[in-house]
Amino acid sequence: MGRRLTAILGIVLTIAALGGCRNQQREQTRVRSEGLELMTLIDVALVLPDGRYASELRGGKASGPAACWPAAVQLSAMAAAARVDDRWTLPLADYAVALDPHLATFNSIDGYAATTQSPDRFYDDNAWVALAMLETHSLTRNPEHLRRARTALDFVLTGEDQTLGGGLYWHEQTRQSKNTCANAPAMVACLRMTRATGDARYTAAALRIYDWLQIRLRDGDGLYMDHVKVTGEIDPTKFSYNSAMVILANCELYDATQQVSYLDDARKTARAAIKRWIDPLSGAIGDDTPFASLLVESLLELYRRDGDRRWRDAARSGVTFLRTKNVDRRGWHPARADDQPKRPIDAVRLIDQSAAARAILIAEIIR
């Protein structure tokens, strides 16, 4: 932990210096410093002695280690921080290793369990881990991080079968439903894995999943429904992150194929997502903070490819609300991205802070 604390101390001192001349800085620098400031707040308040992060801070006391999904969101937030300030690269690399206690082997297959005490493994958890590890590898170039990403993603793909014509299950042990929250991030991870390794099998898997999603869970408005049970019953609930991850997959498919039809699909989903989730007056994103963060990222990635400022402006409106209104006086964010805390948040969840920080940082990276 010594090297890690030295790195974080340097970041804290830099942020303090930035705060002293904040009024003299241009807006983008101010936004960036707020993202790093939140990351440092997380590190000070929620890091545990073993290098993992607590799932929440309640009454000033940290809980036990975060489960796999919040941990993956924190790893992705640290990767975004490292893209802005390379002093976060060392803490990022350390945390990637700190997730190893989640690794479990069942039926001769390795994968990340939801907690270190439970054998339950979720395919969506592992998709989020794969994405975060791939981004970590892109920054560290450490082959061990790529190996961890491949372990998680290969486990995810064991969740695919021909029930309902294809697609990935949500939960290994029950296999009762196939959810967009597993299939959509898996597509993105597969496409990025091909880019990292040259292994075209992952792109083939992404295309299979993409075609299945269009048939089974895409609604007529271009948004994606939550899941389909093995009985064929569909849950039509729509969360912003499900559609956001398909937008990201379309962007990656366009990069891989240069087929404009993928961007067209992304645009249709983006238009519908803005209409459904972004308040035209406040700019707030009406969903849970971890979901809203991914909508911000997907809109900015689409803007990066087609230059349409509608996507950038919508994403920035959500980030502006996060920074200015969706925060208590101590700097913590609530569970909903459209809430305006009037008093200090009692239960500070890691996943909400990590997601908010990543959204703020991604808005600085993609201008």
Image: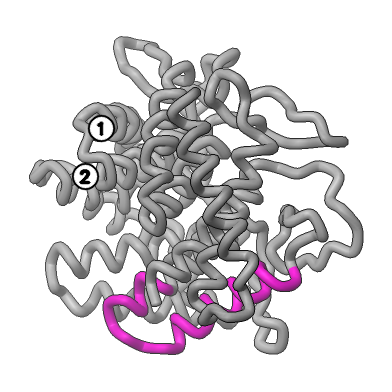
Quarter holding residue 307: bottom left
Tell me the tag on residue 193.
2
User: Is the residue under label 2 in contact with that under label 1 (CB below 8 Å)?
Assistant: yes
**Could you say which is closer to the camera, residue 219 or residue 106?**
106
Please name the residue that numbered disc 1 is placed on.
150
**Mark 2, secondary structure of its residue:** helix
Q: Which amino acid type is marked by label 1?
A: Arg
Q: Give the range drawn in magenta.
A: 300-325
Q: In this view, does 265 lie to the left or right of 261?
A: right
- Magenta highlight: main SS: helix
Vertical relation: 364 (above or below) 189 = below
Q: Position of residue 355 (x, y in %)?
A: 57, 53
**Mark 1, secondary structure of its residue:** helix
Q: Position of residue 20 (x, y in %)?
A: 64, 67
Q: Which amino acid type is marked by label 2?
A: Met
Which numbered disc, 1 or 2, marks the residue that appears first in the sequence? 1
Q: Where is residue 341 in the image (x, y as percent from the top left)?
A: 84, 62
**Could you say which is closer to the camera, residue 169 or residue 203?**
203
Say which residue appears at 64% left-offset and 71% top-offset.
Answer: 285
